[in-house]
Image: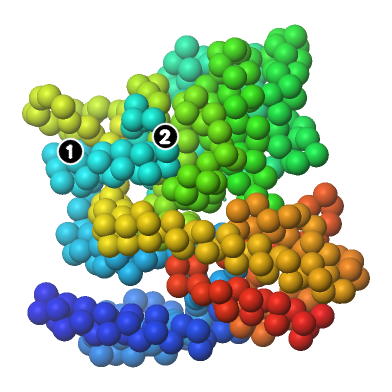
Amino acid sequence: MNHDDLNHWSKRAADWATEYHRTLRERPVRPAAEPGAVAAELPAAAPEAPESPEEIFADFERLVPGAMTHWQHPRFFAYFPANASPASMWAEQLANAMSAQCMLWQTSPAATEIEGVMVRWLAAALGLPGRFTGTIHDSATTATLSAVLTMRDRATDWDASRKGLFGGPPLRVYASSQAHSSVDKAVGLSGIGRDNLVKVETDADFAMTGRALKEAVSADRAAGLVPAGVVLCVGGTSIGATDRLAECLEVAKDEGLPTHVDAAWAGSAMICPEFRGIWAGVEEADSIVFNPHKWLGVQFDCSVQFLADPGPQVRTLGMRPDYLETPEHGDIVNYNEWTVPLGRRFRALKIWFTLRAHGLEGLRARIRNHVAWTEELCGIIRTMDDFEIVTEPRLALFTFAHRGGDEATAALLEKINSDGRVYLTQTRHQGRFVIRMTAGAFDCAREDVMSVAEVLREFA
Ligand SMILES: *Cc1c(COP(=O)(O)O)cnc(C)c1O
């Protein structure tokens, strides 16, 4: 295959993509795939001789789309969305054509500079003060890992990266029991150890309070342990819980502890001023992560971390071997020093295209619809005899259960997902098996959300 073939087959791929999106509603959201079925169709080893694009494309069409869960399906209500605007997919094609490795300004001047501007545009769009800079990661997990590694290094006077964590008293990181598992993973990977992630008790609204945080930190100090930082949750994955940010950030400041806010999903909704109350006080945080790939329409993967001061993170993660030295002077940024991997994709381009092609007003309208439709659906399910709303809508997420108990709820979920018209997933809340409902697909319409009630009526 050469570049002339690429031209032809890219156009074929674009035609395929248009048709795919146009007919997505006709497909089941989740395929009826049997484990191992696709692998069994593939030869045992790579071909020795080149094969034709015709054969390759035919196998793609035969094997892949029918065995994929369709994340861009308008009735995808599982997990959190990973929604992709048409503009972001278009940008991704161009980034793909250049396939640049954006580790240094010199290896990618435009990508680096657009990244800086996009982070500032997004900070302003979310209502954050102009002093925030930041960077783009692949995922919130990586951003949170970067923040926790920085907490570790700060707490050890920058010794941990060089000497390791031997000998000193245990470091402690604080988060609520609603925090995402990526926080546990980050604390484990950092060498602090998952047992030293303190899951602070939450209040009746499943929020960590300043008082509970203060008590946990004081108890640790009294026991000779070393508090290293606080991770706060805004729109937790399970039920959308949000910590009391202003109080907790004040306590952290009093205690001299760095803070990281995980708003991976809910952060996108902060482009709507009326939702910003849930993270009031956030401007005092040191680090904030949100995933434009979840709810803002920027094609996966794209996670933005805002930093009040990038200095400590760059000091923790930045490496400058001889072979990465470049001759520029002046005001340039080498973003690899802000992130865990050296290699970096050109993710800023799809943010730029999305913000321009859809406009903040277009993106706000979508999120407002998702929230309103989710509330409307919740109201309908509340009136159905067989169901109970377990947690109320927080932005576009609520949970419910069958009144018959965990087994009935789990059986119902399996039935719904095998049917394929909609796709929902579960969580455990206070020991109960509950179904999560969250609307957020880019092309989701009101009828798509309301179709959940229809399916529930049929299967209850
Ligand atoms: C989805 C999610 C994450 C993990 O996101 P990745 O980008 O997949 O690593 C972390 N925290 C919260 C609150 C999330 O919803």
Residue 315, quarter of picture: top left
- Report x, y in % for residue 76: 56, 72
Asked if marks 2 and 1 touch (Cβ < 8 Å), the reply is no
Q: Which residue is mark 2?
A: 128
In the rendered image, which quarter contains the C terminus? Answer: bottom right
In the rendered image, which quarter contains the N terminus? Answer: bottom left
In the figure, is residue 388 to the left or right of 268?
A: right
Give the colour scheme of this rendering: rainbow
Outermost residue toward the front?
274
110 and 326: which is toward the camera: 110
Mark 1 residue element: loop
The span from disc 2 to disc 1 (Cα, nearest Å) is 26 Å
320 and 452: which is toward the camera: 452
- Report x, y in % for residue 167: 60, 13
Q: Nearer the viewer, mark 2 or mark 1?
A: 2
Mark 1 belongs to which amino acid? Trp
Residue 122, quarter of picture: top left
Mark 2 residue element: loop
Q: Which residue is mark 1?
A: 105
Mark 2 belongs to which amino acid? Leu
In percent of the image, x 70 and y 82: which residue is there?
A: 454
